[in-house]
Image (tube, rainbow, N blue to C red):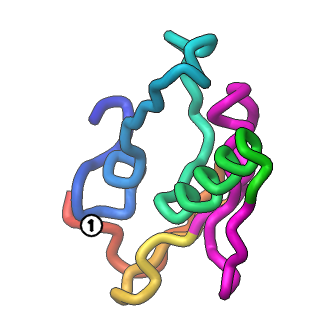
Amino acid sequence: NYPLRSGKTTLFEGALRVPAFVSGPLVKHLAGKESHGMFHVSDWFPTLHGLIKQRTGRSVQLVNPIDGVDQSNMILNNGPSARQEMLHQLNLGNQAYRLGDYKIIVGNPGEY
């Protein structure tokens, strides 16, 4: 995982950062570009909802509020991330909170 510290089962960046890609005709103009913005798995639903709304003008009526944020600008325009903070693994005793470039870890961050 060089240059990131550590790997799976830890709260270090080597375990928390993962590669991903988006492909298709809407992002063809961004071929070969990289983005290092913050994106959580909970952001996929509002992002896909935002993309569908932009293309069709139709929206889904949500019954309850959702945790994620719409990252469609980041995907379509290579814009900045709409997320500035992230909470990692709150319920297992060991916790990490990231705000921008800073992260605080409470408890055991992992074995290596």
Is residue 94 among what the camera can see?
A: yes
Residue at x 47% of width, y 59% of height: 41
Query: Residue 66's quadrant in the figure?
Result: bottom right
**Residue depicted at x 41% and y 76%:** 89
Q: Would you name the residue on which mark 1 appears?
A: 110
Q: Quadrant of the C terminus?
A: bottom left
Q: x%, y% of residue 1?
A: 27, 35
Location of residue 4 in the rendering, given as x and y in whole percent from the top left corner: 38, 38
Q: Residue at x 37, y 63 (%)?
A: 11
Identify whether 62 is placed above or below 56: below
Q: Name the kind of residue labelled 1 in the image.
A: Gly
Q: Is residue 110 left or right of residue 90?
A: left
> Where's residue 92, x and y in %?
34, 87
Task: Give the camera-side residue of 95 and 31.
Answer: 31
**Label 1: which secondary element:** loop
Residues shaded magenta: 59-86
Residue 58 lies, in percent from the top left, at 75, 56
Q: Nearer the viewer, residue 75 or 50?
A: 50
Query: Magenta span has 108?
Result: no
Task: Out of 35 and 107, give the one closest to the viewer.
Answer: 35
88, above or below 5, in the image: below
Is residue 83 covered in magenta? Answer: yes
